[in-house]
Image: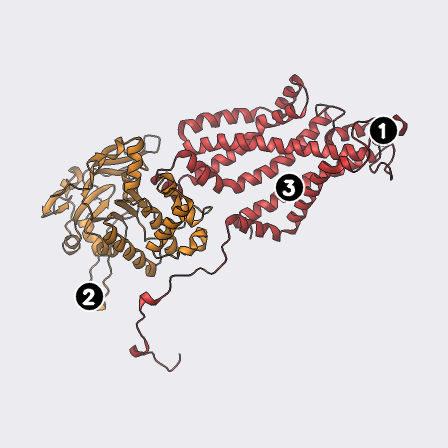
Chain colours: A orange, B red
Amino acid sequence: MSKPLIEVNHLSKFFNLGNNNILKAVNDLNFSIEQGETVGVVGESGCGKSTAGRTMMRLYEPTEGEVLFNGKNIYSMRGSELKQLRRDMQMIFQDPYASLNPRMTVMDIIGESLDVHKLVSSRKERKKRVEQLLDLVNLNAAHASRYPHEFSGGQRQRIGIARALAVNPKFIIADEPISALDVSIQAQVVNLLQDLQRDMGLTYLFIAHDLSMVKHISDRVAVMYLGKIVELARSEDLYSDPRHPYTRALMSAIPIPDPDVEQTRERIVLSGDLPSPIHLPTGCPFHTRCPIATDKCKVDAPKLLEVKDKHFAACHYA
Amino acid sequence: MSDQTLKKQDFAKLDRTEQPKELVVRESISAWKDAWLRLKENKLAMISLYVLIVIALFAIFAQFMTPYDYKTNDLSSTNLPPGPDHWFGTDALGRDMFERTWMGAGISLQVGLYAALVDLVLGVIIGGIMGYYGGKVDEILNRFCEIMYSIPSMLVVILLIVVLEPSMFTIVLALSITGWINMAWIVRGQVMQLKNQEYVLAARTIGASTSRIMFKHLIPNALGPIIVTITMTVPSAIFAEAFLSFLGLGVQSPAASLGTLINDALKAMTVYPWRMLFPAILISLTMLCFNIFGDGLRDALDPKMKK
């Protein structure tokens, strides 16, 4: 088996809110991503998906743990090594209205990556490269001199993708790249991401809360709950045979685009609210809302164990 | 409802590849151009801008418009009323008031602009550091600003001018010693708000340096409030200078600012009112125009403020 491109070991990110309140946004994350693979991360709002992505991008320094990129810990990188990492790892952001500097033209937004890494030697070359990148994401190259507010959400998101691609990255973290977009545009952007993956051999970490979209794009899916991965499996396995009660509840919420089957769909409605990540429940973090929780769950936190071939779940009863 | 019903054969499948790439038809307009267009709509602000330009032009070129200069005494023609020879009359030493008034306007404008410039540089640098780094750095600098702010600024200004010789340099220095704090706070607030924007994070993910993030991403987006603060600083500096001149701490004779002219004229206000009239009108006009223009600029740069 080849070595994974990304290896996440015991990654934790806590935020100190003062007054001894510690928000455990990401709590002991372990997984790996193979070269050319897409790993989806799903979970409800506030479960730490975005924080995990940003910490892996080294926008935040982790509280504990390490992320290995090609076998090297990214948090110990300095200077030119870190700069090379910035070329290898890129990020696509959630809000296409906030992720582009309103005072810069598209040419400068995409060209900035080229400038920072000195990838072009002349203005002419820079212009050519930016136009090439715009073409790659199906935007009209003639619009390079325009400002972000002149584009629609989907177009802006594609500008954001072009910016990420400018440095020829190997690994892209897509932080809910489609959740701010209109449904009709979502498919467009997802298809673009898939085409780019095929053509350029990219590896993705795809963060989202839309389960059907994640299933469509991901090879493997990780389900997060309160900063922890509760289930990790190949996407077919996860969707056909979810083992963790939380995943089952999530799956039961996906509408089925067939009226006859949809009528028989049984929803598992979870009781209660998401517990505060400042005061995590003891034992299994999910026991407060779990339909099958027992006394054991209240004291004993289950580990993420392999329940089937390459199918991991963190539940005593999986 | 119409009686025509749509049937399946009414629809034809479009070939996606034949569709042209999306077109944006509107002419490209930058945020600055947009703001300028909005400012042009605002009549009052534009009139103020023109008046300020005229005042500035007169302050520069008035010296070439009459045979007199601002400092030559002519004791044979003191305290003359406005007339064809001396357009604004003369003062107690027979100096031409037209020249002195415009010279005063020039000095007042310079004091205002230099004070605003010093505030801008200090405020943006210190405010930017506070906002961007946050944490301990912010805490310490912010406490320092609060301490500076709590000292009565006029007292500091007067003390400083008494210790140093009164001149334009000392006045600007004295006004800036506490003046930059407001600007620093405004920049700090803006930077704090902007630094977590996704485009700043995006700049960090591509490995942009701190100075690049500061000057390419943060400052340009905070420029609206910064410019507005400047246009409000200029009139307050002009006013502060006039106030100091009134106390006799302004620029020293034979040079003059609008404040010193009014101070001189005060002694004979009831007898020779025109000596006070022109500088007073000019200083009021300048401050009014700066305030209206600053207001208009704020509306133009921040379209959300309107309606």
* Tag in front: 2 or 1: 1
Q: Quadrant of the N terminus of chain B?
A: bottom left
What's under tag 1, amino acid-wise?
A: Gly
Quick check: do tags 3 and 2 share a chain? no
Chain for mark 1? B
Quick check: do tags 1 and 3 share a chain? yes
> Which residue is nearer to you in this view: A179 or A146?
A146
Disc 1 residue crowd, few under 14, some 14–19, many 20+, Cα 10 Å? many
Which residue bears the numbered disc 1?
B94
Which SS class for mark 1?
Answer: loop
Using the image, tell me which numbered label, if any, was put on residue B127. Answer: none
Residue at 42 percent of width and 37 percent of height: B213
Residue at mark 2 to residue at mark 1: CA–CA distance: 102 Å
Which residue bears the numbered disc 2?
A261
Relative to A70, say whether A272 is above or below: below
Chain for mark 2? A
Which SS class for mark 2?
Answer: helix
In the rendered view, does B272 fall on the left or right side of A145? right
Res A287 → quadrant: top left
What's under tag 3, amino acid-wise?
A: Asn
Residue at 25 percent of width and 44 percent of height: A170
